[in-house]
Image (cartoon, helix red, strand yellow):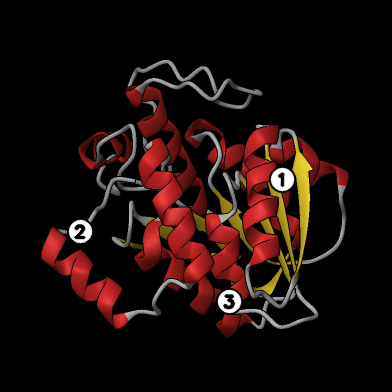
Amino acid sequence: MTDALPEATRQVVELAGPAPDATQRAMQDRAASDAFPIIGPAAGGLLSVVARLTGAERVLELGSGFGYSASWFARGMGPDGEVRLTERHADEIELARSFLEEGDYAPWFRYSVGDGIEIAREETGPLDVVLLDLEKGRYAEAFETVRDRVVSGGVVVADNVLQGPHDVDDVLARLGAASGPEPDVDGGSTDESAGTASTPEATDAGTAAGIARFLARLRRDPAFETVVLPTGSGLSLSVRRR
């Protein structure tokens, strides 16, 4: 995990937010030992608040890793809720299952191995919250896939919009500093993942272009209102207004 906030600021945010529970601390230890990227407790606390504020009963994650973000969503949900985890790596889903079934969480978890976008296309029904944390070049495609299923007042959250394999300066350069309704977000780079079923490996430039393309797409959508918060690696929150 990279962090968009200065260290002292990050610590204040974490200390002011909800403390990780025992299961989440075990997940954090596992992530540290494996050098596995997770959203971290500051961003996790925000996910819990989003679930609670929206009264979320159905949460869909596109890119779940081993369940850390799902555990935070669950903390803001009641026993009638459901968190659907999707992850292309079966070993990570099994690890998520082992962690989450040991934790003290109210909602039901559903686990699916495969491409998150393809899984989302197979299902119907309303969604209260969606988390995008798959290949960054596919964020715009993922948003289009779930857009019409997000309920009024529902939220689409995307991770790594400020930091990741890319740098925020790369995103800004491609976003065009908000110079128009449809800026040139590609900046001349090649992003093999754009609009296709990409591999997980993306170049830094391609990742930045994908994030910029996604943010520009959100900005053009009158049904959604978006803010970007410099928490964790940067989270965008897009609320459906109608």
Dot placed on the residue nearer the N-terminal end, 2 or 1: 2
In this orientation, which residue lies closer to the viewer: 4 or 16?
A: 16
**Label 3 environment density (alpha carbons within 10 Å; few <14, some 14–19, many ≥20):** many
Q: Is residue 125 left or right of residue 104?
A: right
Query: Mark number for residue 75?
Result: 3
The image position of residue 157, as x and y in percent, is 52, 59
Q: Nearer the viewer, mark 3 or mark 1?
A: 3
Marks 1 and 3: in contact by CB < 8 Å?
Answer: no
Residue 39 position within the rendered picture, expressed as x and y whole percent measured from the top left: 42, 54
Residue 17's place in the image compared with 128, above or below, is: below
Residue 164 vs residue 72, the one in the foreground: 72
Task: Provide the residue designation for mark 1.
Answer: 145
Disc 1 element:
helix
Image quarter of residue 105: bottom right
Q: Is residue 154 visible?
A: no
Q: CA distance from mark 2 to mark 1?
A: 31 Å
**Residue that appears at 52% across and 74% down:** 48
Residue bearing the label numbered 2? 5
**Amino acid of disc 3:** Arg
Q: Is residue 200 above or below residue 130?
A: above
Q: Earlier in the sequence, mark 3 or mark 1?
A: 3
Closer to the chain start, of discs 3 and 2, is 2
Give the amino acid at mark 2.
Leu
Residue at image coords 28%, 60% = 230
Q: Position of residue 104 (x, y in %)?
A: 64, 75
Left or right, residue 85 beside residue 179: right
Element assignment for label 2: loop
The C terminus sits in image quarter: bottom right
CA gap, disc 3 and disc 2 = 24 Å
Comparing 25 with 236, the one in front is 25
